[in-house]
Amino acid sequence: MWLYLAAFVGLYYLMRWYRERQVVSNLRDKYVFITGCDSGFGNVLARQLDLRGLRVLAACLTEKGAELLRNQTSDRLETVILDVTKTDSIAVATQWVKERVGDRGLWGLVNNAGISVPTAPNEWLTKQDFMKILNVNLLGVIEVTLSLLPLVRKARGRVVNVASVLGRVSLYGGGYCISKYGVEAFSDSLRREISHFGVKVAIIEPGYFKTAVTDAEMISRTFREIWDRASPEVKEVYGEKFLVSSMKMIELMKKQCTQNLSLVTDCMEHALTACHPRTRYSAGWDAKFIYLPLSYMPTFLVDAMISWGSPRPAKAL
Ligand SMILES: NC(=O)c1ccc[n+]([C@@H]2O[C@H](COP(=O)([O-])OP(=O)(O)OC[C@H]3O[C@@H](n4cnc5c(N)ncnc54)[C@H](OP(=O)(O)O)[C@@H]3O)[C@@H](O)[C@H]2O)c1
């Protein structure tokens, strides 16, 4: 019985491995547009796809980031300046892409640009704090996608959206987790609608990786700024000890971060180049062995575990 089961599982993985190895043809003629290429995953992916021979259209937030990227890549890679929070900037970038791809359409759109601060307990934050993150991580993804979708449909291509394990488990307050849950929801509905036209949508769910969005100094600094401007009532009920413990936890996150960004960019590359891409990719050991299982557990258990591992406010009951 166990032998049959092992053989069945083995066969399943063998078939899956074979199916997932098949690569689309004519990669050198395919255009891929990536947002947020100044640093982190976007930057590594742009260089990786350029080496693989694809035609990379890299969107950077700054001219400095664009210039650095161009200096490290082949002449085939082109850059454009894009702020995903600005409708005008998206329109200009869309026209720029249109002129390059022509009748072939756009094979790949990678919505990667993102920010992680301000992050703090919900009660410490203002509506503007939430909007700051949502504008980049969620509304930016939606507007860029809506603007480029006709070109992706023309190529029967791929949309690859970068969510996070925090789009599965809401670990802390602020706009970040909300934005990533939103990216998951947007991607799911889009996938179902756009599959009719041969377009595939993949979601990347990385764990914690060492990039600018997980920079502990930057997160601690904004956490402290939010605390400093919090109301006297918030300061009283949470207390200085809560702040210190939270800062220690942010510092601990540094140790948890995986250094090898290609664990994420390899997933993105697979989503763009495989004949049969996955719908979701979990990248990193923590994503696979902690956050993914956590997301399937009963809520009361997850609440208890998170509460046990978090600092307690001074006036907690
Ligand atoms: N690192 C992780 O552990 C982790 C985990 C899960 C998900 N993610 C997600 O992965 C994606 C990439 O982040 P990363 O980790 O590679 O960090 P990163 O190095 O900070 O990359 C984010 C990129 O987005 C750009 N950007 C910021 N605001 C923008 C805007 N308004 N318009 C256009 N581009 C903008 C940044 O430009 P500048 O460099 O010029 O600011 C940067 O190039 C994000 O969506 C993030 O949420 C990261």
Image (spheres, helix red, strand yellow):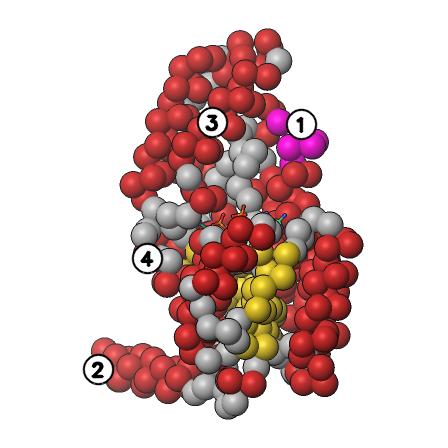
Residue on which the image places disc 3: 221
Amino acid type, callout 3: Arg
- Residue 232 to residue 214: above or below: above
Q: Position of residue 71 (x, y in %)?
A: 45, 62
State which tag comes first along the sequence, 3 or 2.
2
Circle nearer the viewer, 4 or 2? 4
- Of badges 1 and 2, the one in the foreground is 1
Q: Where does the image place residue 6, in percent across and percent down from the top left? A: 25, 79
Q: Amino acid at mark 4?
A: Asn
Secondary structure under tag 1 reads: loop
Q: Magenta region: which residues? A: 125-130
Please state which amino acid type lies under the numbered disc 1.
Thr
- Dominant SS of magenta comes to helix
Residue lying furthest bottom in this view? Answer: 25
Q: Callout 2, which amino acid?
A: Leu
Per the model, the C-alpha gap separating discs 1 and 3 is: 17 Å
Spatial CA span between label 4 and label 2 = 37 Å
